[in-house]
Image (cartoon, helix red, strand yellow):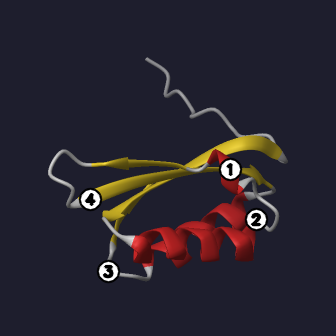
Amino acid sequence: MADQQPPKIEFPCPDYPIKVLGDAGDELHSLVIEVMERHAPGFDQTRITINESSKGRFQSITVWITATGEAQLHAIHTDLRTKPITKMVM
């Protein structure tokens, strides 16, 4: 069986979702906004979705950006992972 390559993203890619999982609270939300403004200025903050875990300990925050390239996506993931409140970035 031949190895299948993952689909490649064509840039720019509008409506590219990024989901951040972390400790619930304003600090996570502020971090996500700060990082997105730095790497995807002008992203639509009205499309942000926030979901709480069943016990309220964690949150998932999803934002949609226009992805301009792999370097941008790598920088976003790296910046989000610098804080211990961030548990996972997808």
Q: Earlier in the sequence, mark 1 or mark 4?
A: 1
**Element on which disc 4 rests:** strand
- The structure residue drawn at horizontal position 79% and vertical position 43%, both measured from the top left corner, is 13
Residue type, mark 2 in image? Ala
Mark 3 or 1: the one toward you: 1
Q: Earlier in the sequence, mark 3 or mark 2?
A: 2
- The structure residue drawn at horizontal position 65% and vertical position 61%, both measured from the top left corner, is 73
For residue 79, the mark is none
**Element on which disc 1 rests:** helix
Give the residue number, with chain letter if any, for mark 3.
84
Residue type, mark 1 in image? Thr
**Element on which disc 3 rests:** loop
Residue type, mark 3 in image? Pro
Residue 76, located in which quarter of the rendered image? bottom right
Q: Earlier in the sequence, mark 4 or mark 3?
A: 4
Give the residue number, with chain letter if any, for mark 2.
40
For residue 46, the mark is 1
| Disc 2/disc 4 C-alpha distance (Å) | 25 Å
Side (left or right) of 75 relative to 20? right
Mark 1 or 4: the one toward you: 1
Q: Is label 4 in contact with label 3 (beta carbons under 8 Å)?
A: no
Mark 1 or 2: the one toward you: 1
